[in-house]
Amino acid sequence: MATPNHPDAENSSSNPQRRAYEGGGVRAVALVTGAARRIGRVIALELAHAGFDIALHHRGRDARAIAEAEATAADLRAAGARVQLFAADFADPAATAELLPSIAQAFGRVDAVVNSASRFEYDSPAAFDAALLESMTRSNVAAPVALAQALAAQVPAQARHARVTPCVVNLLDQKLHNPNPDYFSYTLTKAALAHATVLLAQALAPAVRVCGVSPGITLVSGPMDDDEFAKAHKLTALGRSSTPEDIARAVRFLIESPAITGIDLAVDGGQHLVGQSRDVLFLARENETPSLLPSLPPEGELGSARM
């Protein structure tokens, strides 16, 4: 079940720059999924500094996850945003369906959805498990599509915002343009979400825009250590891949660009231009055995051992 907590009535009416952005005092509201940590957190902070109020989605399954969400909420409030926390497990279709209506009820409107949360586990074609693919599809494809549909259903019930046209941004992966068979089921789900981005952009226009951002290797993940990450981060055309701030700025750009829809913006230092036969984890680690890799944490993890 989607559950809100920690309402924050703070406003930023004393800030003239924010008042100008808000366009007559109506503040845009963004849902960022997986916003408690990692890239989702940085995206939420970017939008908060830009004048958005934030619906912070998290899974909330344990004390650590809740503590991370509360710490991020405090930082968002310090940036001037109103914030509420919403716990929902995207493996549960009912919880997913309740999420956006709960946010609309709490804030009075929803202007943007950033689908940042993603489940991410290693497998290969040789070890394909249909049950794993089905499970990952629920969180990586079905949930983002359901949230886009819910935003489209909400838009007619709210006044048009002066600056922000309703927008969904799906975080994809540069490996869709530079494919390799590692993380096989994960890659299939991201490919499906990339096609859904285009189809939804067609189906939901003109009321809602739908865009994608494809990060490259962005953060240390799973078994990768700092040295391996430093090597992998340079395996791009520009000699450096993306940072969380790069991704967050790209998301904000798309949300604030009313003439853009249906595109996939690669923010990866040109990694998608460099042919890579394996995931960068293996390119940076010569003697790794894929079958020994542990699964990565599911909340807010984006991309193949990179985000």
Image (tube, rainbow, N blue to C red):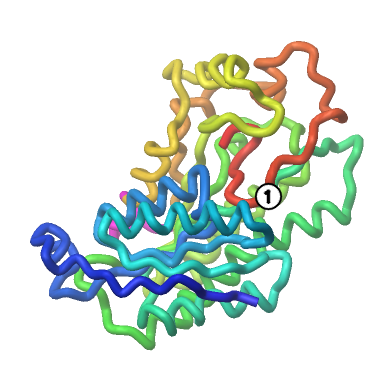
Density class for disc 1 (Cα within 10 Å; few <14, some 14-19, many ≥20) is some
Q: Is residue 256 magenta?
A: yes
Residue bearing mark 1: 298
In the rendered image, which quarter contains the C terminus? top right
Q: Is residue 51 left or right of residue 120?
A: left
The quarter of the picture where residue 260 lies is bottom left
Give the total number of marks visible in the rendering. Answer: 1
Q: Amino acid at mark 1?
A: Pro
Of the pair 65 and 179, the residue shown nearer to us: 65
Residue 207, image x, y percentages? 38, 75
Of the pair 125 and 3, the residue shown nearer to us: 3
Q: Is residue 245 above or below residue 57?
A: above
Residue 109, image x, y percentages? 36, 79
Q: In the image as oriented, which residue stretches furthest toward the top?
A: 286
Of the pair 82 and 146, the residue shown nearer to us: 82
Of the pair 5 and 146, the residue shown nearer to us: 5
Instruction: Name which residue lies at 36% across and 52% down.
Output: 75
Q: Is residue 260 magenta?
A: yes
Q: In the image as oriented, which residue stretches furthest toward the left?
A: 16
Q: Is residue 176 above or below residue 115?
A: above
In the rendered image, which quarter contains the N terminus? bottom right
Q: Is residue 38 left or right of residue 124?
A: left
Main SS of the magenta part reads loop
Instruction: Name which residue lies at 43% across and 69% down.
Output: 84
Residue 134, image x, y percentages? 81, 59
Task: State the extent of the magenta-drawn residues as a range.
Answer: 253-262
Q: Is residue 97 left or right of residue 273?
A: right
What element does badge 1 sit on? loop
